[in-house]
Amino acid sequence: MWDVIIIGAGVVGCSAAKYLSQYKLSVLVLEKGSDVCSGASKGNSAMVHAGYDPDPGTKKAIYNILGNAMFDELCSELDVPFNRSGTMIFATSDEEMCEVNRLKELGDRNGVSGVRVLSQQELREKEPNMGKDVVGALYAPTGGIVCPYSLVIAMAENAAINGVEFKTFTEAVGFERLNDGWKVLTNNGDFETKLIFNCAGIHADKLNNMVSEDKFHITPRYGSHILLDREYIKYVDTTICQTPTPLLTGGHTKGMGIMPSVDGTVILGCDAEDYDDSDDVACTTRSLKKIVDYFNKVWRYLPIGNFADRFPMDGIINSYGGLRAHSDRDDFIIGEVLDAPGFINAAGIESPGLTAGPAIGSHLAQLAVKKLYAEKNEHYKPGRNALRPFRNMTKEEQSEAIRKNPDYGKIVCRCELVTEAEVRDAIHRPLGARTINAVKMRTRAGMGRCQGGFCSSRVLQILCEELNLDPLEVTQSGGDSYVLLEKACCSRCKEE
Amino acid sequence: MEKELICINCPMGCRLSIVMKGNNVEMVIGNVCSKGVEYAKQEAVNPIRVVTSLMRPENREKPFSVKTASPIPKHLIFQCMDEIYRTHPKAPLASGDIVIQNVCGTNVNIIATQDVL
Amino acid sequence: MKNVDVLIIGGGSAGMAAAISAREQGISNVLILERANYLGGVLRQCIHNGFGIHKFKEDLTGIEYAQKYIDKILEMNIPYLTNTFVLNLSKDLTITSINSVNGLMDIQAKAIVLAMGCRERSRGALLIPGTRPAGVFTAGTAQRYLNLEGYLPGKKVVILGSGDIGLIMARQFTLEGAKVEAVVEIMPFSSGLARNISQCLNDFGIPISYNSTVVNIKGRKRVEAVTIADVDEHRIPISGTERDIICDTLLISAGLIPENELSKEAGIILSDRTKGAVVDDFLQTSIPGVFSCGNVLHVHDMVDHVSIESEIAGKNAALFVQGKLAATSFHDNISVIDGDGIMGTVPQYIHRHGNEEQIRLMFRPRKLYKNCYVCVDTGGQCILRKKRMVLTPGEMSEITINQDILANANDSIIIRVEV
């Protein structure tokens, strides 16, 4: 019998796994996708929110503040790129300035340190290229940007190194109450456990509603983002959003922002659109057009507007999106289910979910530790032995790396400067890559300007070499997402 | 009998109307130069194409490229492909080597277009 | 620090032609740096014919065409390094390269020829909405899987864009036994060569839909269908015209983009129209001693023209090293301006008293023209007028100017189409 089964390997699930692995507990993570970080945890705007936005007293507010404070140490321990580059909310009218002041007040009530309204002079000092029609701004120095999927993968790897087991392609389909715990029924076998953490994102409601009369509903709420080529990042130092008046956001989101990603691209987004289908992560023309139209309108306010006179359609390298898990209770649903003891929810984790994730995971872990009287794991190893990305090395470090391992001298992805050494490592790490997308998430190969046009065939070859696969077995993202369908030059002779 | 064709000799892409009696091209209209007439006569009566493809050697992992040494009748393209797929020469091969003699009875050979080491 | 006289970045058709030309001009210290593990660039995955008709008066496959140059490189003993990637390029003509044998290598060149080619426009760059299943490829990537690896990446294919690579793959997929359901082109005309429409689509009954585009991709794990819609004169999809085509593959052949990251890094001035370097008639960029040719300068349709252009670049790089190239900056030269109906003329500057008797200007028309004239004006006067039967955006055009006509030209000449 397991001590804890975590359902869902997103930011909350993996964070809980990491913190649980610091104790002598047997932990199993079940993920229905082909890899960790399959859901909203990889499709968000990468923002680590300062915390002035959620209503005071809500779980969103509390965990936002707690989570935000954890990022420096956590990312440092796990070698995850994180930049506390600040967030600025600008106003172009008196009405918007009211909103700025309201957010400042909220920030104070929520305990956000350093949040302040900038005077015109301070604003111009901070962002000399800000549009001249901007009348004022809120500045939150504790806001930041992280690489969300690197964070989730890093926490998962650390958990795995410390004994947590992960099963992918495993979907929870039912539960049975036992005397001393639960049986989790899946498509891949049944598992008994003392405690369950329901971290199942947009499916958390289905799971909860199987075991409890206290039901809730999750509405998948889609948000798209557009990525600009890394040549634009020099014009973007800090995250800048316009004041999110309801007219702008439809009352649903924090509004749209322009973000300097930690990887050198520029992120623009995001909007919100409710979906029925809870697995259909599809960008729509409507949502992409909304982003382009919006930024064309506000371009002149932004510092980047000084350097490019309109939104650079030619500079777009990709778009992406994710489904937020919006609960009908409008707040995070965290805690043990009263009529299903041992079943613990972490549901409705929409924005500020990424920021709150580590704090929620830590909290869940502590719940389990108390319930199970767990002892500390004295063999716990922090960190995850990540390879330093070649592109971030100094020239001397690069030379040394190649000397020690010539595979560092073979460039696989030339847009993001990813070497063979890193691709092979991604495959052999704990919870190593098995698919093209998994290699992409761990190394960035395929995330650049050409979007894998040049490197994907080499990545496929390396996957075959390292995992002893036939090229026809390699998938884009697991399941039957095969890249190649048939051996060429063969179909006719097969018919004989 | 009338036929419509697009000449492919140059970017002009003249739309040609051809009047035929049996297998004889009696008249070509719409051409800007004489190349159009030549093309039309061939294309209307016996359209021919160069076929390029991959072929698998018996003793190598990857296929190599081949082509018909000169154009063959268009209606034999897929038959030609069948014959190419059923042929597995032994490497090594040199670019220009004949890998199929007289494909589909056309008197045209299939030759390798790259060295296979 | 290694010293090279003429350094060539890129060992494809452009790089090889430039290297041979530099060597023939008398430079022995030539070095080609190529990132793949073979010379020939993208020609090595082109098993189809149509190459070399102008240059060699032969109808060759891409591989055969490349092999002629590779044989020459080997015969002339021109040094080259494969699996070698150039990390950066500086204004002072130094580069850092990387490979697994030499590690990082700093090279000081006396002249550099940029021959990096281009990349394909991706699904992401086109912002095509929909899911992210397997089965979405650029045409060149599919060509690579098929011709270099020997695998068929799709059995039921829709092709977005009528660029030549897509048309060629339409034919090859069909010959391989796959079904190409349709080619979808957003413009009212093809962006590829007319002969390819005929021999790759018409021959096999593959329909092409003009003024249409893909507005959605469906499928969870692998492509299951794409949604096509008609577009209006502003290329905006018209609501209500959507229809689905069931398929397992979407091939994208919607444009090539010159790979000028290194050029940008070095501060070389790029043209917004060609996306390549601004050059003079020596094919020299805004940095003296740095030359550009082939697809990285402007996207070509025929490799024969790449070779001819690259020979000029290679020769001039050699002349530069030999101190025989007139040292003038762009501003002393005649600037070449795109007039009515013309875009992307190369070169953008011409020396008033240059080395060559004739200068070849290459350009693309903005739209389809039949029975027209290409005119070159200066100071309001027409100094050259040539009849053209047809000009189409899918085929690069040219006009040759004699050096003596330019003797009295103003600071600029305008090249335009007259109907």
Image (cartoon, grey):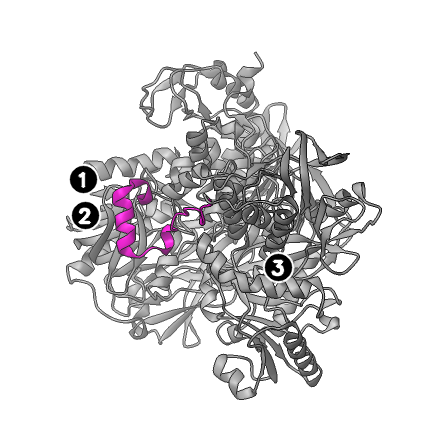
Q: Is residue B112 left or right of residue A240?
A: left
Q: Which residues are the magenta region?
A: A380-409
Label 2, label 3: how many angstroms apart (C-alpha)? 63 Å
Chain at numbered mark 2: C
User: Is residue A110 in view from this perspective?
Assistant: yes
* A395 in magenta: yes
Which of the numbered marks, if any, corresponds to residue A356?
A: 3
Amino acid type shown at disc 2: Arg
Disc 3 is attached to a residue of which chain? Answer: A
| Mark 2 residue crowding within 10 angstroms, few (<14) / some (14–19) / many (20+) | many
* Depth order, front residue of A273/C304: A273
Camera-side residue of A452 and A38: A38
Mark 1 = which residue? C76
Which chain is home to disc 1? C
Residue A380 position in % (x across, y down): 47, 45
Q: Is residue C312 visible?
A: no
The amino acid at mark 3 is Ala
Quadrant for residue A299, please give it.
Answer: bottom right
Residue at horizontal 37 percent and vertical 34 percent from the top: C63
